[in-house]
Amino acid sequence: MRIYKEFTFEAAHLLPSAPPGHPNARVHGHSFRVRIAIDGEPNAETGVVVPFDDLETALADARDALDHRFLNDVEGLSQPTLERIAIWMWDRLHNRLPGLAEIVVARDSCREGCIYRGPARRQRLAAE
């Protein structure tokens, strides 16, 4: 079974790797949506995989580190692409959330996003 929790944050960034003159080379902002998915079986007594309040608590630090920030200044996000934000989130959450299966980071207004399923899955896919 898979459960998920979503949250949003607002942040500014620029992409240092963008070509000179490209709009992404200048400071600009986005509304980001993040979805965290957890795989597991419901607890026999409680009937839940993970209490959603526990998910909210685990996500609060990561959300607060990003919300209304200049992402380039956040440690580990000097190149704040969707891909790197997803990996950054995974690195901060996987030890706190057993069963973490997937992180989606999206910019809905741009109709784009990134799905990250963690390094183990990436390594398995590369071996196939």
Image: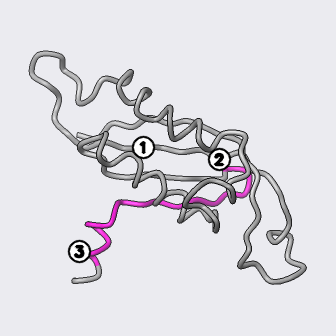
How far apart marks 2 and 1 lie (CA) works out to 13 Å
Disc 3 marks which residue? 124
Task: Please name the amino acid that badge 1 sits on.
Answer: Ile
Mark 1 Cα shell of 10 Å, populated few (<14), some (14-19), many (≥20): many
Task: Please name the amino acid that badge 2 sits on.
Answer: Phe
Name the outermost residue toward the top.
45
Point 34% across, 61% down: residue? 118
The color scheme shown is one colour
Q: Is mark 3 on a helix, strand or loop?
A: helix
Q: Residue 32 carries which label?
A: 2
Left/right of residue 67 with respect to residue 42 in the rendered view: right
Q: Which of 31 and 27 is in front in this view?
A: 27
Residue 14 at x, y = what percent?
76, 64
Q: Is mark 1 on a helix, strand or loop?
A: strand
Q: Which mark is residue 36?
A: 1
Please tell me in which quadrant of the rendered image residue 48 appears.
top left
